[in-house]
Image (tube, grey):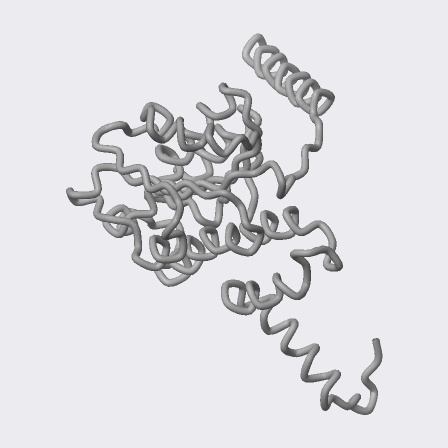
Amino acid sequence: MAKFGLIGLCLLNAVYATLALASNFTYERIDKNNTVLLVVDHQVGLFQLVRDFQADEFRNNILAHAAIAKVFNLPTVLTTSAETGPNGPLPKEIVEMHSDAPLIKRNGEVNAWDNKDFRDAVQATGKKQVILAGITTDVCTTFLALSLVAEGYTVYANADASGAMSKRIADDANDRMRAAGVHVYSGFAVACDLMRDWRNTPGSVELLPYFDKYLAQYAYLARGHDAAVDRGTLLPGEAE
């Protein structure tokens, strides 16, 4: 009986904790004018550790993460960890895409925030919101995200572009970040929150080509609509 009473007390405490978090929640949207994007250890060697995504899907996701900064002209900081060893360099596509961005090559620090050059590069942007993704989710993304929250930044972790050695590890890491106040977003949510309105600039003119390249589901939705408007006809029995 005492055992069930203890379980009930634990459940009650969990409910109270959840309600307390909900009552303190403030919806802070991504502000494209106050945001820096970080590419953290998306290295060709570390890429091979990722097991919660198929390789082709994850390659697309990390390129999409880097590319969204170009769509919205976000300041970007790249960083690698011990890239002359088995971790390897960043993919050439990312380096070429952001040829003018700072590339901080850390020689030993696991948490990028422990590296002074990296901290200086982020702080030099003057932005207070951070979009980041890295390999691995539980180490490179989570450690940095928690450090940034502790420094007063609002952090948005792109879960689609962060990879882990298993889904369970990724889920646990994302839960840990959420508990610390990190916003865990999909890549699609990052793009849409940055845009806010299809009529904005950047808006549909800039985002639809981006989705056409990196988000096949939305690409074919848009292509299907284009084809229907251009030469489509209703089938007998078809209705809205």
Which image quadrant is residue 83 in? top left
Q: Which of the image's four quarters has the C terminus?
A: bottom right
Is 61 left, or right, of 79 in this rendering? Answer: right
Image x and y of residue 41, in percent = 33, 42
User: Can you say whether 71 is above or below 39 in the image?
Assistant: below
Seen at 21% across and 47% down, the residue is 88
User: Can you say whether 93 is above or below 114 in the image?
Assistant: below
User: Can you say whether 47 is above or below 150 in the image?
Assistant: below
Seen at 66% across and 66% down, the residue is 205
Q: Nearer the viewer, residue 181 or 3?
A: 181
Image x and y of residue 38, in percent = 44, 40
Q: Nearer the viewer, residue 63 or 59?
A: 63
Image x and y of residue 89, in percent = 24, 48
Which image quadrant is residue 230 in? bottom right
Is 107 left, or right, of 232 in this rendering? Answer: left
Label total for image: 0
Image x and y of residue 164, in percent = 36, 43
User: Can you say whether 89 is above or below 236 in the image?
Assistant: above
Seen at 44% across and 33% down, the residue is 173
Q: Which of the image's four quarters has the N terminus?
A: top right
Q: Nearer the viewer, residue 117 or 14?
A: 117
Which image quadrant is residue 239 in? bottom right
